[in-house]
Amino acid sequence: MRSSPASESAPAVPWWAWRARLRAWWQSRLPLTDTLLLTQRNVYILPTRAGWMLAATLLVLLIAAINYQLNLGYLLTFLLAGSAAAGMVVGHHTLRGLHLQLLPPQPLFAGALAVLDVKLTSTRRTPRHAIGVALLEGAHWSWADVPAQGQATVQVSFQPARRGLHRVPALTVETRFPLGNFRVWTVWRPAAQVLVYPAPEPQAPPLPPGEPRAGSGVAAGARASGEFDGVRAYQRGDPARLIVWKKFARAEAPVSRDTLHLQRQTLWLDYARAGALDPEARLARLTAWVLAADAQQLDYGLRLPGREIAPAGGAAQRLRCLQALASA
């Protein structure tokens, strides 16, 4: 006789799954902030493995002293217990009152490590020792000593999975100073986000030919020189910024950009003309073209599905285009 589905008992959830759920719920209740002042409300303390071993040793010493009525045993037990208690107070005081600040993270290209600068500021008159900062789910620690009424900066890093806007993962700050018997720590959820650009294509083709401007009288598609159109033979007196140094470095004849020719054309970096590639590969090619056009000090525009950035040049244009590619 087959049992009904309702009569079958649900599989038991393992204890570590409940622990993960409880931890995620607790972290979600922490505020998102790029600055954090450590107080008694957000600093936690528990014995380390060495601390538990010390507690077991003290218990054995105390039982032995009681059993054999050893005054020196009592002295040693209470001396060690007092040292452990003093270490607990000193360790907690090492973090309490410390001010944490996450500096704004810099944009990066996909595949690179996002480096986070964390500033530790102390206002008390004594130094703070052996303070570590790491990702909550990471294993690499950065350690620093904070001078009296001074600052220290530590760096932690993580690798975003893909392009786009990523929230900075939760961080943990801890110390085991002075004896290592107690772990004093806090959990910090920064509000900052990291912008990740698409990784440029390693061997991208040359820039596409420019499109003639309205009224220029230049036939479309008439120029496809392998570099952006508008170069001519070098003439004595040409400014250095107009020389195409890339061609000159390849032992070719020196050439200069034809500014009149450039004025008759507009360089468009078009998603539809990036080749028969998958979407991510097209974005990688467009990223390489943006960097190449910026390196050549050209004016260029960007066309993406549903968005168009007017032609311009300079660092502001490069930033606009890279941000658009990251969020495409």
Image (cartoon, rainbow, N blue to C red):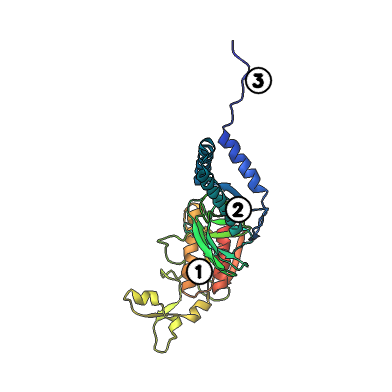
Residue 184 in picture, x, y percent from top left: 58, 52
Give 299 or 326, whichever is nearer the viewer: 326
Give 257 or 177, whichever is nearer the viewer: 177
In the rendered image, the vertical position of residue 1 relative to residue 171, given as above or below: above
Ranked by sequence position, the earlier of labels 2 and 1 is 2
Q: Is residue 175 left or right of residue 224?
A: right
User: Which of label 3 and label 2 is nearer to you?
Assistant: 2
Does residue 234 appear in the picture of this structure?
A: yes
Q: Secondary structure at mark 3?
A: helix
Distance Cα–Cα, label 2 vs label 1: 63 Å
Distance Cα–Cα, label 3 vs label 1: 72 Å
| Quadrant hosting residue 147 | bottom right
Distance Cα–Cα, label 3 vs label 2: 45 Å
Quadrant, the N terminus: top right
Quadrant, the C terminus: bottom right
Q: Identify the residue at horizontal 58%, vertical 54% (top origin).
A: 86
Residue hosting label 1: 220
**What residue type is disc 2 on?**
Thr
**What residue type is disc 3 on?**
Ala
Q: Identify the residue at horizontal 58%, vertical 62% (top origin).
A: 324
Ranked by sequence position, the earlier of labels 3 and 2 is 3
Residue hosting label 3: 6
Q: Secondary structure at mark 2?
A: strand
Ranked by sequence position, the earlier of labels 3 and 1 is 3
